């Protein structure tokens, strides 16, 4: 008997998934445990395996397309088995909703035609022949009301039919948007970029941010790195040492290693440092768990593993969750200093700038030195200015005398 495979919920915040790649095609015999598809979630691209056996009779979501959680991903069954009735029962889509509204929309459309239209509406109607476009009546009505050129909209319904859903998320207010000379192309928003936008917007607009910046003398930090890289086979980066210093400082300031819980404050016992890693699609933040209990070499190795997995989209959900503090380093790109948006559910994030050679005063003399600026973004609901300043003071002391944490 045919069985529906639904779009799985692969993370607690996932609402829809994108099929990055199908590893099977219609007609293939599927065994339990076979790799069916790569699914891009809100956090990573995950391999999805079959839990049933049978012939792949139907693919419900094409590659690069998205679908809500619990919608039809595929159907397995016996070869030649009819699945039309199964599809009609399971596939409750916006297209079906459109069809239910057709009669009402046609009445409304006739009423609209009887009304006087403005000169601008008349000009739009001359350019756009809504009757020749393959779209549901409801979609045509919405496009006409918004003044959208429906000829330029890609339909996601059956055989490319334009439906209501295709018009809901358009960031367009005027029909001449599509006729702008400077508009070259459109790029779909990836699932990762959608989540980044939603999470950081929520963080920025719901968490009252404040910022503290400190300039740090990093001469001893440079010496430590040179000595380690000179005497050991493995190589460590400045970021590796900074993350260890952050973890060490958090162990001295537990009131920074906390989270907002709406009606309570979460006191995190473990110090789990999120490390921001840039990828083509956006930003991933894998987590070094119990960073205060690991040495610099362990942290360095873990970050290298994260970087490789991030490039190949192999990071697991367990590696992308559980952060209590985040470090974002743009120093390698030559950025002097910047402010970062807090990564939920953290109370703080540290933005690290580049190491710069500059004149500094030592022993009442001006000499050539190396400094680095770090900026702490804090959620003022959880962290006060004095608490943030004390944490930065400890971090500054540790980075200026890094042997204190070894």
Image: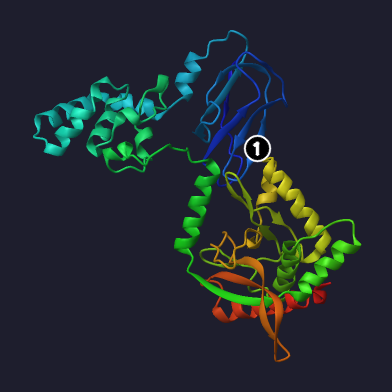
Outermost residue, top side:
80
Name the residue tied to disc 1: 46
* In this rendering, position of residue 200 left or right of residue 292: left
Task: Say how many tags the image has.
Answer: 1
Q: Quadrant of residue 3?
A: top right
User: In the picture shown, does residue 16 fall above or below 323?
Assistant: above
User: In the picture shown, does residue 126 fall above or below 25?
Assistant: below
Counting from the top left corner in percent of width and height, residue 86 is at 50, 18
- Residue at position x 74%, y 64% from top? 238
Instruction: Return the residue nearer the eye: 208 or 70.
Output: 208
User: In the picture shown, does residue 382 fall above or below 111?
Assistant: below
- Residue at position x 66%, y 80% from top? 359
* In this rendering, position of residue 98 left or right of residue 50: left
Quadrant into which the N terminus falls = top right
Q: Secondary structure at mark 1?
A: strand
* In this rendering, position of residue 165 left or right of residue 15: left
Instruction: Return the residue nearer the eye: 373 or 369.
Output: 369
Instruction: Return the residue nearer the eye: 382 or 351.
Output: 351
Q: In this orientation, does residue 240 appear? A: yes
Q: In this orientation, does residue 316 appear? A: no
Q: Within 10 angstroms of label 1, few (less than 14), some, or many (20 or more) residues? A: some
- Residue at position x 33%, y 39% from top? 181
Q: Quadrant of residue 237?
A: bottom right
Instruction: Return the residue nearer the eye: 114 or 359.
Output: 359
Counting from the top left corner in percent of width and height, residue 213 is at 58, 75
Q: Quadrant of residue 405?
A: bottom right
User: In the picture shown, does residue 244 fall above or below 214?
Assistant: above
Way the structure is coloured: rainbow
Counting from the top left corner in percent of width and height, residue 146 is at 25, 39
Counting from the top left corner in percent of width and height, residue 366 is at 69, 86
Quadrant into which the C terminus falls = bottom right
């Amino acid at each position: 008997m045919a069985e529906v495979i639904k779009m799985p919920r692969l993370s607690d915040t996932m609402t829809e998934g994108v099929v990055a790649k199908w590893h099977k095609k219609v007609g293939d015999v599927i065994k339990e445990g076979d790799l069916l598809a790569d699914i891009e979630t809100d956090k990573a691209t995950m391999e999805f395996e079959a839990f049933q056996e049978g012939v792949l009779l139907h693919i419900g979501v094409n590659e690069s397309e998205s679908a809500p959680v619990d919608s039809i991903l595929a159907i397995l069954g016996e070869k030649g088995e009819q699945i039309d009735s199964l599809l009609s029962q399971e596939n409750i889509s916006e297209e079906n909703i459109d069809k239910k509204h057709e009669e009402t929309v046609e009445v409304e459309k006739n009423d609209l035609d009887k009304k006087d239209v403005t000169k601008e509406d008349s000009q739009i109607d001359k350019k756009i022949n809504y009757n020749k476009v393959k779209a549901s009546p409801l979609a045509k009505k919405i496009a006409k009301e918004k003044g959208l050129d429906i000829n330029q909209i890609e339909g996601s319904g059956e055989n490319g039919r334009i439906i209501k859903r295709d018009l809901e998320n358009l960031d367009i207010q005027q029909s001449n948007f599509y006729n702008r000379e400077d508009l070259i192309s459109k790029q779909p928003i990836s699932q990762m970029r959608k989540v980044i936008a939603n999470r950081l917007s929520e963080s920025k607009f719901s968490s009252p941010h404040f910022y503290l910046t400190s300039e740090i003398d990093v001469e001893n930090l440079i010496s430590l790195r040179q000595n380690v890289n000179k005497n050991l086979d493995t190589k460590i980066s400045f970021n590796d040492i900074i993350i260890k210093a952050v973890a060490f400082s958090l162990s001295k300031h537990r009131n920074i290693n906390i989270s907002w819980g709406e009606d309570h404050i979460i006191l995190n016992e473990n110090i789990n440092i999120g490390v921001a890693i840039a990828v083509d699609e956006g930003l991933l933040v894998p987590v070094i768990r119990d960073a205060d209990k690991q040495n610099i070499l362990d942290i360095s190795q873990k970050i290298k593993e994260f970087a490789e997995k991030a490039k190949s989209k192999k990071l697991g959900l367990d590696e992308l969750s559980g952060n209590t503090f985040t470090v974002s380093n743009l120093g390698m790109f030559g950025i002097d200093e910047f402010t970062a948006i807090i990564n939920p559910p953290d109370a703080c994030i540290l933005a690290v700038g580049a190491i710069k050679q500059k004149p500094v005063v030592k022993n009442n003399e001006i000499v050539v030195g190396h400094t680095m600026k770090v900026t702490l973004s804090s959620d003022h609901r959880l962290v006060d200015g004095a608490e943030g300043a004390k944490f930065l003071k400890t971090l500054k002391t540790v980075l200026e005398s890094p042997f204190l944490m070894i």
